[in-house]
Image: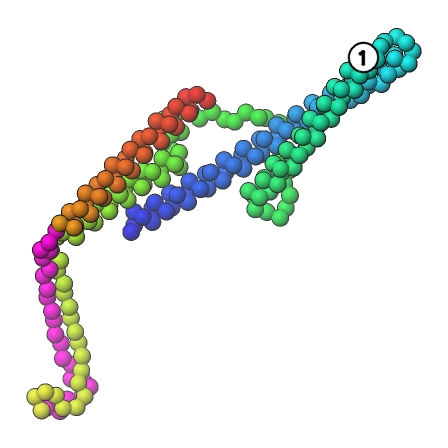
Amino acid sequence: LTEEWKTATALASLKEAELKKEVSSSFYAILTLDAKEKLLQKSDTLLTEFLRKATLRLKKGESNVLEKTTAENQLGQLKMQLLQLQQEKDLLNSKFQFLLNSETEFVPEGSSFKMATPVTIEAKIEQHPLLQSLEQKKKTASAQTSLEKAKKLPTITLGYNNTSITGTGADNVIYDKNTRFQSAQVGLGIPLFGGSQNAKIKASKIQESIAENELEKERLSLENQLKNV
């Protein structure tokens, strides 16, 4: 039960880390869209001015209608990109507020889009909450195997009773409540049929192997992901 409690604690830490990751991802995604929006707005200003001059050149007979049409198409596409970007920002902002679970509306601010690189891959992997939760899951499976093995051992039971009798007892003697009667009991339980318990032990060992394999698989996966960063 102690190992199961530790596993639940590790899973809670994993969920916390996943939430922080989602918040960070949304934070930097909004910053990136803000920077992209500023570039598009600057381009919008330039294209609007270009269209104005193209229209004026067309009126003066210094250019043909193709130049004006091209400018209008480019400006229209740019405004469509701005509209799509704004819709994407609205969705991200809604997600960001949902993750923060706050009635206060927070606006991400920052000047850097680069996240810090871990000192070493090995250190980063060992601190990863996913591996820590899987490591604890393996310990829980091992504890379960030890528990199933312990059920095959003899059990000792001890009992003690302290009571009183008011009135006439079985020996025709009158007793009051101040007279106490004590008794003790000792028992020894020896398992006779261990077939089903042996099957449970084997099943628990299989769960141990599964937990070990899952841990190693995720460790290798994380190593490959960090090497490719």
Closest to the observer: 49 or 113? 49
The stretch drawn in magenta includes residue 162: no
Q: Is residue 63 left or right of residue 207?
A: right
Q: Where residue 228 sits: x, y (%)?
A: 43, 21
Above or below for 169 versus 156:
below
User: Which residue is label 1 attached to?
Assistant: 66
Specify start and end residues of the magenta stretch as a single range.
173-194
Q: How many marks?
A: 1
Q: Where residue 53 sits: x, y (%)?
A: 85, 15
Give the residue at x 73% y 26%. Answer: 79
Q: Is residue 157 left or right of residue 210?
A: left
* Residue 41 visible within the image: no
What amino acid is labelled 1 in the image?
Leu
Q: Is residue 224 left or right of residue 163?
A: right
Graded by Cα atoms within 10 Å as few (under 14), some (14 to 19) or many (20 or more), the crowding at tag 1 reads few
Above or below for 47 versus 92:
above
Give the residue at x 68% y 32%. Answer: 86
Closest to the observer: 212 or 192? 192
Residue 162, by quadrant, is: bottom left
Q: Secondary structure at mark 1?
A: helix
Give the residue at x 40% y 37%. Answer: 129
Q: Where residue 51 sits: x, y (%)?
A: 82, 18
The stretch drawn in magenta includes residue 181: yes
